[in-house]
Image (cartoon, grey):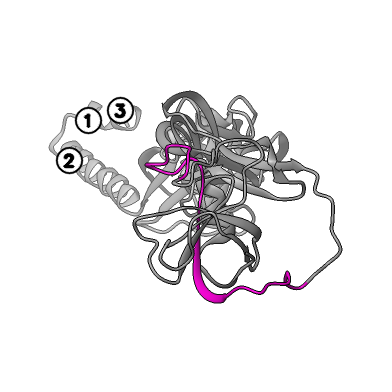
Amino acid sequence: MQKLLKPLLAIKTKTGYSIFTIVVVTLFSTWALFEATKAEVVVAADGEEQTVKTHIETVGELLDELGINVGKYDELSHAINEKIKDGMEINLATAHKITLIIDGEKEDYITTAETVGEFFKEIEQVITLSEHDEVSHSGIENINGNMEIAITTAFPVEVIDGTEDSQQFWATDGTVKELLDKNEISIGKLDKVEPELDEELEKDMKIVITHVEKKKEEVEESISFGTEERNDSSLEKGKSYTISEGTEGKVLKTYEVIYENGKEVDREVVSEEVLQESSNKIVAIGTKTVKKAAPKTEPASSGKTFTMEATAYGPDCNGCSGVTAYGINIKKDPTPKVISVDPSVIPLGTRVWVEGYGEAIAGDTGGAIKGNRIDVLVPSEAYAASNWGRRTVTVKVLD
């Protein structure tokens, strides 16, 4: 501009000044018009924004002038050959390569997303992430250059805790113990866990927890009695009677009881204390051999016949001295055949036959033996109670 104005400046006349003024005004107007016809464009690339004024015709030419290269996979808001317009906003998103490593398997992707979260939203139709999956980068992290993102897919693990309903948990790795600790599932000292606590987690694994409890319980139990047999030579062979009944004893047992999930599965005696000893039942066993006589119904008799109520007693009865009112020793072996009578009915010393007892001598009396009643002598009081009882018999006087 100064070169153009030099000749004019050399003119010092009034006319010269007028020409100079006209030229200056004309040049300024031309320049102002040139600037005014430029298009104002905003260019945003790689996060940087700049405003430029230009007469360049196309978007591609403008980017070339600004030194901005557009890659094959870059995302450009306008076509390269699109005409520049005043107020235009040109956005360029540079594409990046991302390598996804999913459970060790690699796959490459090209994206123009700015953040990891936006990238995953782009590919959600291809890859669906679970909230339990483990991702090496956070969703808000910016994507820069070539990035590797590792994903470990979570898998379900079923846990059955005692008698509670089955629960499902998600894991990507670790041991059985780490999973239980993470989910605040407590294990007691005696509890059983299958698989073992140090077992590595696997897909669709089932963990079963059995809660074990030990308790001590005291129980009072009966001690059974045995049977003791004693030979009795006064009793006919093949017969027996109870001398004394047995009695049960008592024992206090302490058990260690094991419960699994509240149910008893085992018990073991750890100590016992006898509170009362048992006593055996004593039974007399007859050993006497008796020669069998020819059967006969009743002995011949010319005397009286009575129908009487008969009971039995033994030489060991209360108040028995061992010698009858007639002077017979009833404790000798074998026991003699003696009956107690009312002397006013059957005189002492009379030989009699008693149905179911045989021949005997009326040799004793008793305070309760009155009228048509007799008491037959048997080997013992126990035998009398268990083998004779009370019965109605026929009594015949033999002499």
Q: Residue 258, image x and y in percent?
A: 51, 35
Q: Residue 365, image x and y in percent?
A: 42, 54
Identified at 59% across, 57% down, the residue is: 387
- Name above or below for residue 89 compared with residue 23: below
Q: Say if mark 3 contacts mark 2, CB within 8 Å.
A: no
Residue 2's disc is: 3
Q: Nearer the viewer, residue 249 or 219?
A: 249
Local secondary structure at mark 2: helix
Q: Nearer the viewer, residue 367 or 275?
A: 367
Local secondary structure at mark 1: loop
The residue indicated by pointer 2 is 15
**Segment colored magenta:** 297-324
Secondary structure of the magenta portion, mostly?
Answer: loop
Q: Nearer the viewer, mark 3 or mark 1?
A: 3
Identified at 52% across, 41% down, the residue is: 246
User: Could you tell which of marks 3 and 1 lies nearer the N-terminus?
Assistant: 3
Asked where in the image residue 300 lies, by quadrant, the reply is bottom right
Describe residue 252's horizontal placement relative to residue 379 as left or right. left
The residue indicated by pointer 1 is 11
Q: Is residue 89 magenta?
A: no
Q: CA gap, disc 3 to disc 2? A: 20 Å
Q: Amino acid at mark 3?
A: Gln
- Name above or below for residue 277 compared with residue 204: above
